[in-house]
Image (cartoon, rainbow, N blue to C red):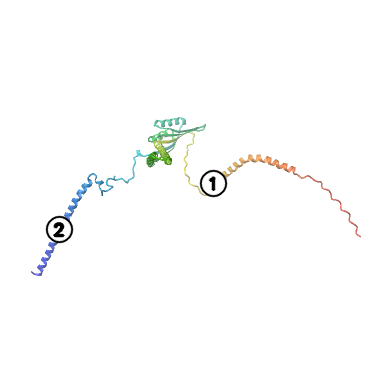
Amino acid sequence: MSQRKWWRVGLAACAVALVTSGCGAGGSDDSGSASSAGEAAPARDQAAAPGAAEKPGADANQGAPPNAGAPVKFRLEDRAIIYTGSLSVRVEDVNAAATEATSIATAVGGFVGGDKRSSNDRYAEATITLRVPAPRFTAVVDQLAKLGEQQQRDVNTEDVTEEALDLDARITSQRARVDSGRRLLAQAKTLSELVTLEGELAKREADLASLEAKKRRMADLTALSTITVTLLAPGAKAPVEEEEKEEEIGFLAGLKGGWTALVASLSVLLTVLGALLPWFVALAVPVFGALWLARRFRRPRTVTPVPPAPAPPAAPAP
């Protein structure tokens, strides 16, 4: 055979060898994939079976809810909210309006927490504090505003849901501590142990009573809202809310402040002088009288001077 034919035969043999090796590799890969799939299927079935999570090596978070770490969301009806409100209403008859306001509160299951009234020839005014159920808070405020001409309204809310939950948890824990203290007290064998455990138990019971009192107070504030209504006669002045004013600066502001301070200082000085003047008068009369008497008795007597004797005549010169 010629050299060219030998090259052709060699190339053909190489091509056949490459094709054969590629098919063998593909077959081995396919068989490996099939075996892996066959092993994974029973594993999935085993994981899906009941009690698979309890076996060693199972994922600890497999049975956890999807939002286990998310914050707890409360519905509006489950929240603990404290409602407080105040309003001023100008009415024609203060006493009649006060009676009607009391009737509005008692009709929804509330009561009167305070009633303060004042009147004279010029004006009449009544301040009534009402406690009404929280679900009827808004309706009662609207009814009170219709008693006359509304002058001012202020409604505030405070969400104490987190505080209430924390207080419940603390009460539960404190009750467990009290029960534990009582069991230990029942097992005391010596007098010293008895005295020590009684003191500790008394402290725990006092803390529990304090927490329960806070819980009752919070429950009262969330269950019953507070409304303070001020009823004004036609001639009474409406309460004005204090507004923050910007601080005035400059020459005129300084002059005004200095004049105000001067007037205030003079007022204080005159007040002090007016308070001391009766004391000065009461003390001046006896003091001046004593000084006058002392000068009168100590006055020196008048002495008549004696004229000097005449000088002797001078001797004549020799």
Nearer to the camera, 102 or 158: 158
Of label 2 and label 1, which has the lower sequence position?
Answer: 2
Badge 2 amino acid: Gly
Q: Residue 172 location, x and y as percent? A: 37, 40
Does 251 sit above or below residue 164? below
Mark number, residue 190: none
* Distance between mark 2 and mark 1 Cα atoms: 105 Å
Badge 1 amino acid: Gly
Q: Residue 277 location, x and y as percent? A: 63, 40
Q: Quadrant of residue 291?
A: top right
Residue farthest along the right direction in this orientation: 318
Secondary structure of the residue carrying tag 2 is helix
Q: Residue 218 location, x and y as percent? A: 40, 38
Residue 233 in sight in this render = no
Secondary structure of the residue carrying tag 1 is helix
Nearer to the camera, 163 or 234: 163
**Badge 2: residue crowd in 10 Å (few <14, some 14–19, many ≥20):** few
Q: Which residue is mark 2?
A: 24
Residue 272 in sight in this render = yes
Nearer to the camera, 150 or 61: 61
Residue farthest along the bottom direction in this orientation: 3
Does 55 sit above or below residue 120? below
Mark number, residue 257: 1
Residue appearing at x 46%, y 30% in the figure: 95
Quarter of the C terminus within the rendering: bottom right
Q: Residue 30 location, x and y as percent? A: 16, 54
Residue appearing at x 16%, y 56% in the figure: 28
Q: Quadrant of residue 271?
A: top right
Left or right: residue 283 versus residue 217 is right
Left or right: residue 182 versus residue 277 is left
Residue appearing at x 74%, y 42% in the figure: 297
**Badge 1: residue crowd in 10 Å (few <14, some 14–19, many ≥20):** few
